[in-house]
Amino acid sequence: MASATSWSEENFSCPICLDVFSSPVTTPCGHNFCRTCITHFWDEQFRYKCPVCKELFHTRPDFRVNTLLSEMVGQFRTSVRVKEKPCVESAEVPCDVCTGSQLKAVKSCLECFTSYCHTHLEPHQRVTGLKKHQLVDPTDRLAERMCKKHERLLELFCRTEQVCVCQFCTEGDHRSHPVVPLKEEYEVKMAQLGNIESKVLQMIQERKLKIKEIRDTVKLSKKDADREIADGLQALTALMRCFEKWKEDFNQMVKEKLKSTEKQAENVVKELEQEIEDLTNRSSEVKPFSHAKDHLNFLQAFRSLKDPPPTRDWTTVDVRPPSYVGTLRRSLDQLEETLNMEMKKLRDAAELKRVQQYEVDVTLDPDTAHPLLTLSEDWKQVHDGGVVKTLTDNPKRFTNYQLVLSRQSFSSGRFYFEVHVKDKTAWRLGVARESINRKGKLPFTPKNGYWVILFNKDKLVFNDDPAVPLPPRAELQKVGVFVDYDEGLVSFFDVEARVHIHSATGCTFSEPLYPVLCLHSNLFFGRSSAPLIISPVNQTD
């Protein structure tokens, strides 16, 4: 009997599903089917017949397992799987002689430049001439691994010329060059490659971070641009309101002048019309006497004629048109003044909004506070404690002035903080450099390391030499302080009114700056228990 491996798939195919039999069974007429296929076929039929020969069965036949066919199908499936299974794994070298399915090579010949499996290697083990060929472990792309000059395997590396060489090369052109096995140089180069890869990955990461930084900058720029456009629209709207009001006021002023002239003319015309009426009546009274012929009667009647009504000398009366000379100029001057005030308010509000973005968290340093001062538990408030406390000597502590510095210092960039000053009658605040004299008495000027403003009963000055008087601000409640360290700028703001108070420009900073608060409680300034408070920034439009 022929083995199953010599038969084709057609010999083991089910007539219904046309696939290799699965659990083959035989019908009474002798034909074979998959058990599942013939079962489903008969489930859908009214009469039971063979799908191949069409023989009819009066009753549904019982299936009979075809043992022999099942065994042959099993052998066939196994042989198919063996044929389909690859002989060479991806990391192995195939035999160059095998046709069809290639087997794994066991040796490579450096003379033949060919790799052989066990079967095709046999002549090299039997034939005398082939026995002299040099055999090595299986090598892929063998021709590329051979020295073109000596036709020997490239198994060494010349470190001088950085090329692969064979053993014969080391006895010729590379005699004096340092050479090492390929494996050794491979390990060195792999280590170098690892370093390069690590550096490349680091460079890639740095560039990804740079891309993110740039994209974040673009997003921030877009956000800033949108905010700038919105602020510009808001400013333009405010200015347009000024123009509209000026237009209404100007038109009203011109109309009032015209109305006044019209009223004057109307009054004069009424008076003239009244005199005309009176004179017309007088004319009617006099006219009958003009025709009298009797002298006696005329003279007797003339005595009864009433005195004429008083009249006005109209030669001195004149209704002049209103003069508009200078009206537009004065109105435009007023508009310019209004616009300048409005633009200053808009600039100040916009500038305050910008600097508030640089808010920093400031807390007060108890080690610097004058013994008369008392700090809150959160280090955000300072007030006059009324009693000079006995404290340990600390070189950082102020002893002559009621000053306190912040814990935080700033040596670059920009920063902003706000201080609540409401109900406090006298105070100083701003920034001071680290090296200020904390024990002696020196003026609070930039020369001595202070950039501060002084408030005393509605009087406001920037401490300099000489002091710079500032416009009084009686309702001052909260002061904002902004510093641009690199630009040498210190600015002060009235936060509630959103008004710029003063800026010190061209400052030179060469050491850390600290926010500084100063309370004044004595006979000259007056005593006040109200605290100075480092308050959170509330950014409002």
Image (tube, rainbow, N blue to C red):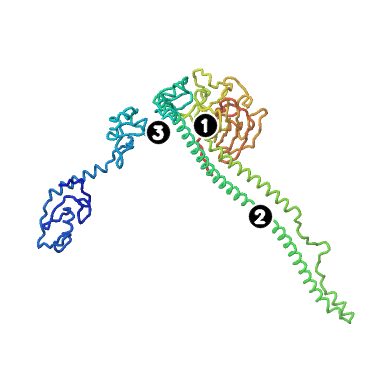
Q: Which residue lies furthest to the top in this view?
A: 393
Res. 255 mark: none
At label 2, counting other C-alpha atoms closer than 10 Å, the crowd grade (few under 14, some 14-19, many 20 or more) is some
98, above or below 181, in the image: below
Q: Which of 530 and 248 is in front in this view?
A: 248
Residue shown at 75% from the left, 56% from the top: 324
Residue shown at 48% from the left, 36% from the top: 209
What residue does disc 2 label?
Answer: 247
166, above or below 285, in the image: above
User: Do the numbered discs 3 and 1 sit on residues whose CB atoms are within 8 Å?
Assistant: no
Label 2 element class:
helix
Amino acid beneath label 3: Ala
Res. 143 mark: 3
Q: Answer whether residue 403 is visible to the viewer in this image.
A: yes
Precedes in sequence: disc 2 or disc 3: 3
**Total residue callouts:** 3
At label 3, counting other C-alpha atoms closer than 10 Å, the crowd grade (few under 14, some 14-19, many 20 or more) is some
Q: Residue furthest bottom?
A: 293
Q: Nearer the viewer, residue 408 or 377?
A: 408
Q: Which quarter of the figure has residue 91? A: top left
User: Do the numbered discs 1 and 2 sit on residues whose CB atoms are within 8 Å?
Assistant: no
Label 3 element class:
helix
504, above or below 401, in the image: below
Task: Estimate the x, y position of residue 541 in percent, counting from the top left.
Answer: 54, 44
Q: Which of 123 and 481 is in front in this view?
A: 123
What residue does disc 1 label?
Answer: 531
Q: In this view, does 362 lie to the left or right of 13?
A: right
Q: Is residue 538 left or right of residue 348?
A: left
Q: In this view, does 385 lie to the left or right of 21?
A: right
Precedes in sequence: disc 1 or disc 2: 2
Label 1 element class:
loop
